[in-house]
Amino acid sequence: MLRAERITVDFGGVRAVAGVDLEVGAKEMLGLVGPNGSGKTTLLNAVCGVVTARGALTVDGQRVRLSRPAATRAAGIARVFQAPQIFDELSCLENVLLSSPDGRLVGLVGAVAARPAMHRRERRREEAALRAMTTVGLAEFAHTSSKTLSYGQRRLLELARALAAEPKVLLLDEPSAGLNDAETAQLAQLLRETRDAGLAVVVVDHKIDFLDSLCDRLVVLELGKVIAQGPPDEVWRHQQVINAYLGVAGNA
Ligand SMILES: Nc1ncnc2c1ncn2[C@@H]1O[C@H](COP(=O)(O)OP(=O)(O)OP(=O)(O)O)[C@@H](O)[C@H]1O
């Protein structure tokens, strides 16, 4: 479903991601791990187009231009950010709708000539938003101010925003950060269901137990390069991975 080839990102003189290949199938959950500064977040940023990157990207066989967030979104890549990006002034449903803007029939043409089509599209968008809210268990809060949500619920609302776009690929950066054990278990179950529904899911997280129980496969980065990949139990036995986590020099 997702194929990223030779992804490279430079920040001035720092090569944050150095020629990484990544493949994730439909119904696969991939964990991206590595020590601090190894390039995990930058790789996610490259795949969703928000940093300037080189390489090649395809989603479901279709070539996608890098460094163009609108192109990656249109290709079916959705991202859940580390910090919930919620607007407190809006209801929960409005927050979810914000993430799937449909500008095709707005303006004079939309308002006058294509009014019925515009209404149909709006209704479909709202249905998708409500479906996503139901999936994450927040349907009852649709018309409630997002201000009233707990931190854990805000993170779920963020997930609903990504799912409302009905993506093929879901990228999550530290989804379990700040969640208690019960919320983390609920999130893990939701992500499994999301994967089983046919999405390719990529998760960056520092909670190793969470990733091990969740992911079909791990990819380990060090200094912007892949140093190991495979099922979690195999990867953690890999000497280069052990050295990377212990901070032993000479693993690049
Ligand atoms: N905007 C930026 N400008 C300059 N350097 C950056 C920028 N973002 C990241 N870097 C550098 O790129 C490298 C990779 O950082 P990145 O945040 O992707 O790593 P990470 O594996 O996600 O780290 P962490 O686990 O700490 O979140 C680091 O050396 C970091 O300092």
Image (cartoon, grey):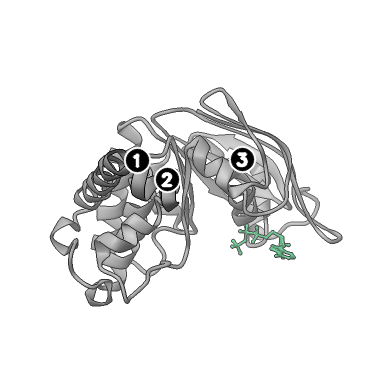
Residue 7, quarter of picture: top right
Which amino acid lies under the numbered mark 2 shown in the image of this protein?
Answer: Val
Q: Residues within 10 Å of mark 2 (few under 14, many from 20)?
A: few
Q: Residue at x 25, y 68 (%)?
A: 91
Q: Is residue 18 left or right of residue 198?
A: right
Q: Residue at x 42, y 45 (%)?
A: 109
Tell me the element at label 2.
helix
Please give the residue where the numbered disc 3 appears in the rendered image.
Answer: 238
Please give the residue where the numbered disc 2 appears in the rendered image.
Answer: 109
Q: Residue 236: in sight, yes or no?
A: no
20 in relation to 111, above or below? above
Q: Residue at x 18, y 65 (%)?
A: 143
77 in relation to 83, above or below? above
Looking at this view, is 28 or 167 the one in front? 167
Specify the farthest residue to the front.
Answer: 112
Q: Position of residue 186 (x, y in %)?
A: 25, 54
Q: Position of residue 93 (x, y in %)?
A: 25, 60
Please give the residue where the numbered disc 1 appears in the rendered image.
Answer: 114
Query: Is the residue marked 2 within 8 Å of ligand 1, measured from its CB?
Result: no
Which amino acid lies under the numbered mark 1 shown in the image of this protein?
Answer: Ala
Mark 3 or 2: the one toward you = 2
Q: Residue at x 40, y 55 (%)?
A: 99
Q: Position of residue 97 (x, y in %)?
A: 33, 55
The quarter of the rendering in which ligand 1 is drawn is bottom right
